[in-house]
Image: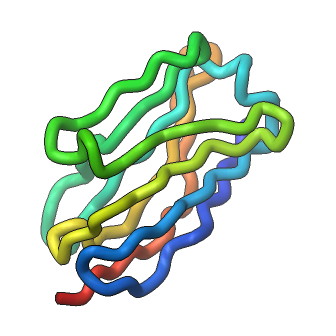
Amino acid sequence: QIQLVESGGGLVQAGGSLRLSCGASGTIYSYTFMGWYRQAPGKERQWVASMYNSGTTKYADSMKGRFTISRDNAKNTVYLSMNNLEPEDTAVYFCNAQFRGHTFWGQGTQVTVSS
C-alpha cells in the first residue's frame, strides 16, 4: 500500500504562483509514473501532468508552459509548480501514482485562484 500526501495548496491571486508537493511512502523512482489531477466543483477529475520513472514528463495542453512537474527522489516527493494561475485553475489537486499495476491517490489539496 502506497500513501500519498499532498500539500502546498492555498489561496492566490490571478497571475500568482504555487508549488504543490506530494510526499510518497515508498521509493518513487520504482513507480511506473506519478502525476497530478484536479477536480473543480461540479466537474469531472481532469488530468494535469505526469512524470514517468524514466523522467519523461507529459502535460495537458492547457497546462503546458504554465505548470511543471518535477521530483526529488531523495525526498520521495513529486512537485507541481504552477505559474500565471487563472481563476479557472481553482480546484482540488490530487496526486496519483501507479505501482505494480495499481493506482494510488492522495487526499487532495485545495487551490483557489481569485480574480
Residue at the top extreme, as displayed: 54
Taking the spot 30% from the left edge, 69% from the top edge, the residue there is 91
Camera-nearest residue between 22 and 56: 56
Q: Position of residue 97 (x, y in %)?
A: 56, 33
Quarter occupied by the N terminus: top right
Q: Is residue 77 above or below residue 33?
A: below
Q: Is residue 45 above or below residue 65?
A: below
At x 47% / y 81%, what residue is drawn? 10
Q: Position of residue 94 (x, y in %)?
A: 45, 55
Determine the residue positioned at 24% across, 40% down.
64
Quadrant of image for the C terminus: bottom left
Left or right: where does residue 112 sit relative to residue 28? left
Write down the quadrant of residue 70 in the picture: top right
113 horizontally vs 101: left or right: left
Q: Nearer the viewer, residue 71 or 39?
A: 71
Q: Position of residue 101 (x, y in %)?
A: 55, 16
